[in-house]
Amino acid sequence: MTTLYETLSVSENATAEEIKQAYRKAVMRWHPDRNVGQEHVARAAFLDVRHAYAILSDPAQRQVYDSVFAEEMKRQEEQRRREEQEQAEREAAVRAAEEAEYASRVALAMRFATQGYNRDVVRGVLLAHDCSDDLACRIADSALALHSSRQSEVASAQPGEIAPETHGTQQEGDPVPTDRVRSFSDIWMPFWNVLRS
């Protein structure tokens, strides 16, 4: 909102003489006869200048204007602060929702990673829960890396025990341990249940 002071290009504390000088300068600048080809714009600006001077040159009218102007500025400032606060609260709510959704997806990925599913399965579960492909890949990689790191920590904490997934020690013809046998149904059913949930 352009103020009367801005129309005359003076400060709010301008003296009566400063206002008169600014008015004369503005009138000369915006007189229609001096703005050939832009008469319509000049005429509107010229009338604004005359209106501003009519009020600011009268002490009583200027006092009323200053009072109303001050109240309006206060109202606009309060409105601006309120809008900024509401915007900040909306942004905070959006961030909180995004963080909660991300945490839920990470927990879901970790659940399948700790059950021994590979990257494609974990990624597929995330995609089924409306996760973008790029984010699903990153979460799946992170979950599997974290699970692998935890397994390594457990194995190093028990050096006297043979890791359950040590490869190369299985002799041909020896029975495969039952805890390492995973049929297609064992893999698919939990995945299908997640898709349905």
Image: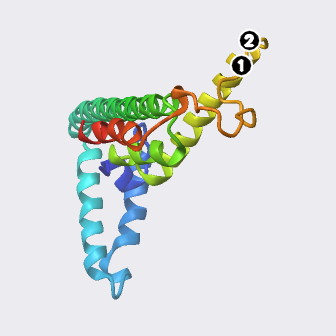
Q: Nearer the viewer, residue 108 or 103?
A: 108
Q: Nearer the viewer, residue 182 or 137?
A: 182
Callout 1: 10 Å neighbours few (<14), some, many (20+)? some
> Percent x, y for residue 73?
30, 35
Residue type at mark 1 is Ala
Q: Residue at x 45, y 53 (%)?
A: 133
Report the residue that reaches farthest toward the right: 159
- State the residue position of label 2: 158
> Percent x, y for residue 192?
30, 42
> Where residue 155 is drawn, which disc sits there?
1
Q: Residue at x 35, y 66 (%)?
A: 27
Q: Residue at x 26, y 39 (%)?
A: 62
Residue type at mark 2 is Gln
Q: Is residue 107 left or right of residue 177?
A: left
Report the residue that reaches farthest toward the front: 173
Q: Is residue 57 in view?
A: no
Look at the image and name its color scheme: rainbow
Q: Secondary structure at mark 2?
A: loop
Q: Are marks 2 and 1 in contact (CB under 8 Å)?
A: yes
Q: Secondary structure at mark 1?
A: helix
Q: Is residue 188 in view?
A: yes
In this view, 21 is above or below 114: below
Q: Is residue 85 left or right of residue 134?
A: left
Q: Nearer the viewer, residue 90 or 22?
A: 90
Identify the image quadrant of the C terminus: top left
The CA distance from mark 2 to mark 1 is 5 Å
> Percent x, y for residue 35?
36, 81
